[in-house]
Image (cartoon, rainbow, N blue to C red):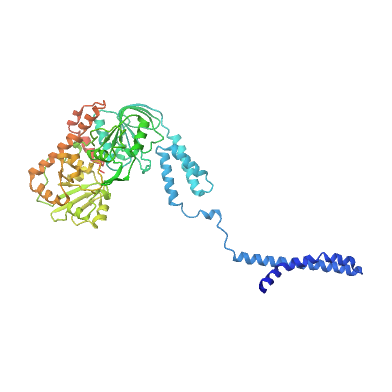
């Protein structure tokens, strides 16, 4: 032990050593020969004892002061612990669970939100926000509580009705056809559990609800229908908690999205929905039902890649095609004025990378850069830039939905639609709208099972030659226009839809669609934007 250590120990222990001597002082006073000396000894001991206590107190105070000076700052108080904005993770959870609370999943959302509000270790600002949302929901539930209704329909359509693309366009076309045929239609908005459920119902569908021929169902209703059409299998991934009491004589599921997002040699990848889950949930809700692919493409994928999973499912042999009313789209028989201006080719779709060829070489071949060819697109600007960089000089780009699709198509001479080769286009409503508008279509070979003779099928490097042939030969151009119209009438018209409906006991006169539209309907239609996915 070194001298410094010994000295440090002595400094700490000498006051207690002196205190140990104090009991000897009374003994000295007792045995001292003179009383005065005894009193002096006692007084001396008391003074020494006081000095020892004073010095020890000063040293302790000095040690504590030094420790406080060297000690790190104390932790922030609770009020400062939650400074700054609420985290993005909590904000996203709040939007997700309050969205489910307000859009059909109250049984699932309420326990989660109540637990969050009761958790003492949670950010108090977040707890307060959740409590406020719960109070607002209860107040709205009391204020907007619907009176129970007993309703009867010919057809009820169940779908996610807040989508911006092809699913909404398909629902709208069928609703319009049913309504014009004199059928009564019920609409049930069923969002997808893990999608954006806070988006409101698409205004195009909301505008069709009149309370008489087209009625929106609520969870308070009891309804019966002859046929229930569920469009979009993803809606059945998880059934809503707040459903109406719905009884359907027959029910079908229209599969307009494949179980996997993409398919290759090794099978599918990027699961979108589970066949087993969807079949189990829909069966639990409505009982026996039939599945329809929306196109031969979807049916072929189900047969090749999912036959074992579909062993217990009733799958129809024929597709449930989308519907389009040519009277709302046809631009007439006048041929384009070729020679007076550049040839206008084009297409329209939402802006997604899979909606375009995934190779820059194929993109440039399908939409060539030529002085006498213009490329007009509505939607997809961002995706094109990701593939080929800046837009070529001969491109004219419009934002998706910036005009009615029929107005955009009236300005085209030839419709050219090529997508990512690995992407499964479940239907292809964009080229269907072009055919209905009377625009010849150039498509990849994989669309042939869907459109048959209605389009010209070629590779991207063959597009320019086909475009020039159409521009140079009026007879050929006119024949391709008529082939597209014929395909629309046979497969995709309201009359074809009513023929399918008759197989389920829902009868209506298809002759109503042979008459031209009333002027008011023709005038109002373009004001309702209807664009493809």
Horizontal and vertical percent for residue 439? 16, 43
Q: Residue at x 16, y 39 (%)?
A: 452
Quick check: 138 left or right of 322?
right
Q: Is residue 31 visible?
A: yes
Q: Is residue 436 visible?
A: no
Q: Residue at x 38, y 38 (%)?
A: 238
Horizontal and vertical percent for residue 70? 59, 66
Quick check: 501 left or right of 441?
right
Task: Look at the image and tell me in which quarter the C terminus lies.
Answer: top left
Q: Residue at x 20, y 55 (%)?
A: 361
280 or 327: which is nearer to us? 280
210 or 133: which is nearer to us? 133
Q: Image height check: is 31 above or below 106?
A: below
Q: Image height check: is 388 above or below 288?
A: below
Residue at the extreme bottom of the image, as rendered? 3
Horizontal and vertical percent for residue 460? 17, 50
Q: Residue at x 83, y 69 (%)?
A: 44
Quick check: 500 left or right of 196?
left
Would you identify the image quadrant in which residue 319 lies?
A: top left
Would you identify the image quadrant in which residue 63 lies?
A: bottom right
């Amino acid at each position: 032990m070194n001298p410094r250590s010994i000295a440090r120990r002595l400094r700490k222990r000498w006051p207690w050593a002196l205190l140990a001597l104090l009991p000897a002082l009374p003994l000295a006073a007792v045995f001292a020969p003179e009383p005065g000396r005894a009193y002096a000894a006692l007084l001396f001991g008391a003074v020494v004892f006081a000095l020892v206590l004073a010095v020890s107190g000063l040293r302790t105070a000095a040690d504590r002061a030094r420790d406080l000076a060297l000690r790190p700052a104390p932790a922030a108080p609770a009020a400062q612990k939650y400074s700054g904005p609420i985290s993005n993770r909590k904000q996203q959870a709040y939007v997700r669970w309050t969205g489910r609370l307000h859009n059909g999943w109250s049984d699932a959302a309420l326990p989660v939100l109540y637990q969050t509000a009761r958790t003492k270790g949670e950010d108090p600002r977040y707890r307060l926000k959740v409590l406020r949302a719960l109070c607002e929901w209860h107040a709205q539930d009391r204020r907007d509580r619907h009176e129970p209704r007993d309703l009867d329909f010919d057809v009820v359509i169940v779908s996610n009705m807040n989508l911006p693309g092809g699913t909404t366009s398909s629902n709208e076309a069928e609703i319009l056809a049913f309504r014009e045929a004199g059928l009564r239609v019920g609409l049930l908005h069923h969002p997808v559990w893990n999608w954006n459920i806070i988006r409101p119902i698409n205004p195009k569908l909301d505008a069709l609800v009149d309370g008489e021929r087209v009625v929106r169902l609520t969870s308070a209703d009891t309804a019966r229908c002859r046929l229930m059409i569920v469009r979009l299998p993803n809606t059945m991934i998880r059934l809503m908690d707040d459903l109406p009491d719905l009884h359907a004589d027959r029910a079908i599921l229209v599969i307009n999205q494949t179980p996997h997002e993409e398919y290759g040699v090794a099978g599918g990848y990027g699961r979108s929905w589970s066949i087993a889950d969807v079949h189990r949930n829909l069966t639990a809700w409505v009982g026996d039902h039939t599945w329809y692919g929306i196109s031969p493409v979807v049916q072929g994928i189900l047969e090749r890649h999912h036959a074992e999973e579909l062993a217990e499912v009733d799958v129809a042999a024929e597709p449930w095609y989308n519907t389009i009313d040519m009277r709302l789209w046809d631009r007439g028989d006048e041929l384009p004025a070729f020679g007076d201006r550049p040839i206008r080719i084009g297409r329209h779709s939402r802006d997604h990378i899979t909606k375009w060829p995934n190779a820059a070489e194929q993109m440039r071949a399908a939409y060539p850069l030529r002085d006498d060819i213009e490329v007009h697109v509505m939607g997809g600007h961002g995706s094109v830039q990701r593939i080929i960089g800046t837009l070529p000089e001969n491109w004219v780009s419009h934002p998706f939905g910036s005009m009615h699709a029929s107005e955009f198509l009236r300005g085209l001479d030839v419709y050219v639609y090529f997508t990512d080769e690995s992407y499964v286009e479940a239907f292809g409503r964009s080229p269907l709208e072009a055919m209905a508008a009377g625009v010849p279509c150039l498509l990849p070979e994989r669309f042939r099972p869907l459109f048959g003779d209605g389009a010209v099928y070629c590779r991207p490097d063959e597009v320019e030659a086909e475009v020039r042939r159409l521009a140079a030969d009026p007879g050929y151009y006119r024949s391709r226009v008529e082939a597209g119209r014929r395909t629309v009438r046979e497969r995709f018209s309201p009359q074809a839809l009513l023929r399918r409906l008759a197989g389920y006991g829902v009868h209506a006169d298809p002759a109503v669609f042979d008459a031209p539209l009333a002027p008011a309907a023709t005038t109002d239609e373009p004001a309702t934007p209807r664009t493809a996915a």
